[in-house]
Amino acid sequence: MSGVRAWVAGTAPAPGERRLHPVTPLRRAWAPVAVLVGWAFHDPNGAQRRLADMTAVSVALVATAVVVGGALYGFLSWWFTHYAVTDTELRIRTGLLFRRTAHIRLDRLQAVDLTQPLAARVAGVTKLKLDVVGTDKKDELAYLGEREAGALRAELLARAAGFAPETAREVGEAPSRQLLHVPPRMLAVSVLLTGAPWALLLAALVVPTALWFATHNPWTVLVTALPMLGGAFASSVGRFIGEYDWTVGESPDGLRLDHGLLDKAHETVPPGRVQTVRLVEPLLWRRFGWVRVELDVAGSANGVLVPVAPRALAEAVITQILPGVRVPGADELSRPPARAAWCVPVWWKGHGLAVTDAVFAARHGLFRRRLSLVPHAKVQSVRLVQGPWERFKGVADVKVDTGASKTVTARLRPAAEARELLRGQAERSRTGRRAARPERWMA
């Protein structure tokens, strides 16, 4: 009896620890059902034979066992999960058989996002995701009540900004000022004017048809067509659903992104952690003067800042996330010399370069232009790359590496210019790091 008492005491929250929302067990209750369904799809003939051999009573008992087992698994996973905010860290304890304790240092937090899948919105709960410097995988608390999740997010951001523990809860959510809102109609038109969904849809019609005439095997056609149709759906309808009602707001803790039709997301672009900003101009968007703004953020999965907007509005948002940065115009970009056409026929015209006091800006792409802006302070290394044919034609590529493990390349520059660019960029990077803003929340 004492052993049972000790086991129960070990599962109880320690002082200061809290449990997740009581609806959380439903999140994992379906796991045994998923295992059973996966086995049935893996061996459909065997599953059909076993089902045919079973009586109605046996089927009912198995179904009851699966439901009870799923409910028990979901309950125990919730029962053994606790979290607590200490003076220096957020501590999350999980695990039924194998215990795991995550210690998340508050001074390493760079983003705290709230997401609400459709079912969670119906239940009135929210998932809290944490971006931590130096980790690729986000830790999360799923699920919390909406009010509790908002309060916890505000507290974590305040603690990460350096507020004392006794005052962090009183700070509350930082105020936000709306900078940009993407109308649904503009988003829908931009999706229709993007080539990827149409290319995948065309491929889904042409390739399976050719395979059918070649093999007359319906399974081959199905296996080929489904991924293409899925890709077309994800890049069109899926993108519209995910980027619906996109709003960008400015607050002391960074730029806030709110979006989603079915699944609501409330994200924050961490200040000082943006390594690269890209302006993307698909060919059919240029008539309207629209651009898409993408990001590379160190240690964060947030990759889109503005899904579509007029260029002037997009550049205004960029100045908020990269203060003092002006986006170079097309007339300011230096093209490669004409001899570069021997290295990259036709497409060489899409490349360009501009180096300002604040950024290294490189453009590539002829039909789908991408202008990448790298603040000098974010450049980790600079390299000059020159193949044998490029050496013969007197051109070279200059590559700059950023803290997000990404590389931006200025292609096909004259060799003498590339060598000078290599030396100058190293000096600009050192100077930029000395003058860079702090990477603290609300700094």
Image: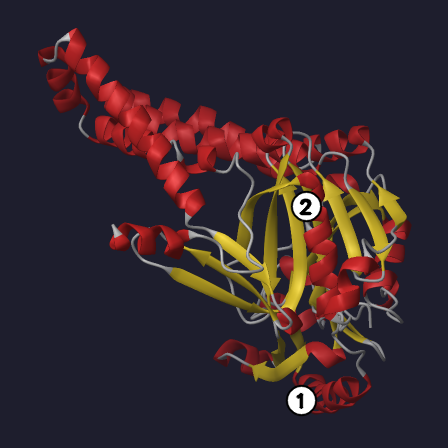
Horizontal side of residue 277 vs 382, given as left or right: right
For disc 2, the neighbor class at 10 Å (few under 14, some 14 to 19, many from 20) is some
> Which amino acid, mark 2?
Glu
Residue 309 lies, in percent from the top left, at 82, 44
Horizontal side of residue 2 vs 335, given as left or right: left
Q: Is residue 195 visible?
A: yes
Nearer to me, 37 or 401: 37
Q: Earlier in the sequence, mark 1 or mark 2?
A: 2
Nearer to me, 441 or 3: 3
Nearer to me, 9 or 161: 9
Residue 148, numbered label = 2
Q: Which residue is mark 1?
A: 419
Q: Say which residue appears at 44% left-offset and 52% top-offset.
A: 12
Figure disc tally = 2
Asked if residue 212 is positioned above or below residue 150 in the image, the reply reads above
Task: Name the quadrant containing residue 238.
Answer: top right
Q: Say which residue appears at 82% left-offset and 73% top-offset.
A: 443
Q: Is residue 199 visible?
A: no
Asked if residue 233 is positioned above or below residue 162 in the image, the reply reads above
Q: Give the Cα distance between marks 1 and 2.
A: 56 Å
Asked if residue 345 is positioned above or below residue 214 in the image, the reply reads below
Element type at mark 1 = helix
> Which amino acid, mark 1?
Arg
Q: Say which residue appears at 76% left-offset and 70% top-offset.
A: 161
Q: Say which residue appears at 81% left-offset and 78% top-offset.
A: 437
Horizontal side of residue 378 vs 83, given as left or right: right
Asked if residue 351 is positioned above or below residue 244 in the image, the reply reads below
